Image (cartoon, helix red, strand yellow):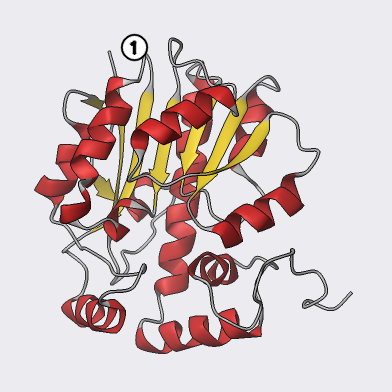
């Protein structure tokens, strides 16, 4: 089957899509010529973008496993992206097969891919919702995803918040999600940092102004605000490579990662 014939209904394979470009960077197969061409242009500007994407993905999977091993059996994955194995539900269910995941994304393209790829996968529910509407996320996670917020939950927000501008109230949105978390819950966040090489910041900003892919690089103290009232787990707020095993070198695109626990 050609790659165009396997495109889900409603998906335009001729226009690059941010989620599919990320899928390409991770070595996934759910991307098309337009996505690969766009990704290759990004790599020409910042050759270590693919490495950064891999670091971020490994952090996410490590955080999910840590939450599952701590007894968390419910996961709300906001900005889940196109499924790529190992997925959040696969890692969580490896620890406990009863784990459930509300897989949330605001992009209809991602939603179409998720419905096509996750049909029949037990314990995982694709949901179309936007982090800028946290009450809707909480309601749909309950009613469609089966999440019980009176019990511990891991809320995972990786690769999302730097696309939410200050006037779109990202801190209020995360605070609303924090308020819904029961004791023992975890908040997992990854966010692009102002520690990123200036050339990459300037290129990213100038090329995306006014688009859904516009990035707000925030300094560490602003990223820390998302964890207000939570206990930060070691190593605290740190670049993705510092969360992973091995002597991994930092990349020019710096993404800060953290896990906060509600006590």
Residue drawn where x is 29% and y is 83% of the image: 207
Measured from the top left, where is residue 1 in percent x and y?
89, 74
Residue drawn where x is 30% and y is 51% of the image: 161
**Along the line of sight, the residue nearer the viewer: 124 or 41:** 124
Q: What element carries label 1?
A: loop
Against 11, residue 159 (above or below) is above
Q: Residue furthest left?
A: 221
Measured from the top left, where is residue 20 in percent x and y?
57, 68
Residue bearing the label numbered 1:
183
Q: Which residue lies furthest to the right in this view?
A: 1
Picture quadrant of residue 91: top right
Category of crowding for the residue at label 1, using alpha-carbon neighbours closer than 10 angstroms: few (below 14), some (14–19), many (at least 20): some
**Along the line of sight, the residue nearer the viewer: 68 or 155:** 155
Measured from the top left, where is residue 179 in percent x and y?
27, 21
* Quadrant including the C terminus: top left
Against 26, residue 101 (above or below) is above
Side (left or right) of 238 relative to 27: left
Can residue 235 be seen? Answer: no
**Along the line of sight, the residue nearer the viewer: 52 or 150:** 150
Residue drawn where x is 59% and y is 62% of the image: 109
């Amino acid at each position: 089957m050609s790659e165009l014939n396997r495109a889900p209904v409603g998906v335009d394979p001729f226009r690059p899509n941010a989620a599919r470009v990320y899928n390409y960077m991770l070595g996934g197969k759910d991307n098309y010529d337009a996505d690969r061409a766009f990704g290759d242009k990004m790599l020409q500007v910042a050759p270590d973008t693919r490495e950064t994407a891999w670091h971020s993905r490994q952090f996410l999977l490590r955080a999910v496993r840590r939450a599952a091993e701590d007894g968390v059996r419910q996961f709300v994955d906001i900005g889940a992206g196109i499924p790529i194995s190992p997925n959040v539900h696969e890692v969580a269910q490896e620890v406990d097969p009863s784990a459930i995941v509300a897989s949330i994304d605001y992009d209809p393209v991602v939603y179409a891919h998720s419905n096509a790829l996750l049909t029949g996968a037990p314990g995982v529910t694709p949901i179309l919702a936007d982090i800028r509407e946290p009450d809707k996320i909480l309601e749909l996670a309950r009613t469609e995803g089966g999440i019980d917020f009176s019990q511990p939950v891991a809320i995972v927000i990786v690769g999302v918040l730097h696309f939410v501008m200050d006037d779109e109230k990202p801190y209020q949105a995360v605070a609303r999600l924090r308020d819904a978390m029961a004791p023992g819950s975890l908040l997992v966040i990854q966010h692009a940092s102002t520690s990123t090489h200036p050339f990459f910041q300037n290129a990213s900003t100038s090329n995306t102004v006014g688009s859904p892919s516009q990035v707000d690089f925030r300094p560490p103290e602003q990223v820390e605000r998302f964890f207000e009232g939570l206990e930060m787990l070691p190593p605290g707020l740190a670049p993705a490579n510092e969360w992973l095993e091995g002597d991994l070198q930092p990349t020019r695109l710096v993404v800060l990662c953290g896990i906060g626990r509600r006590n």
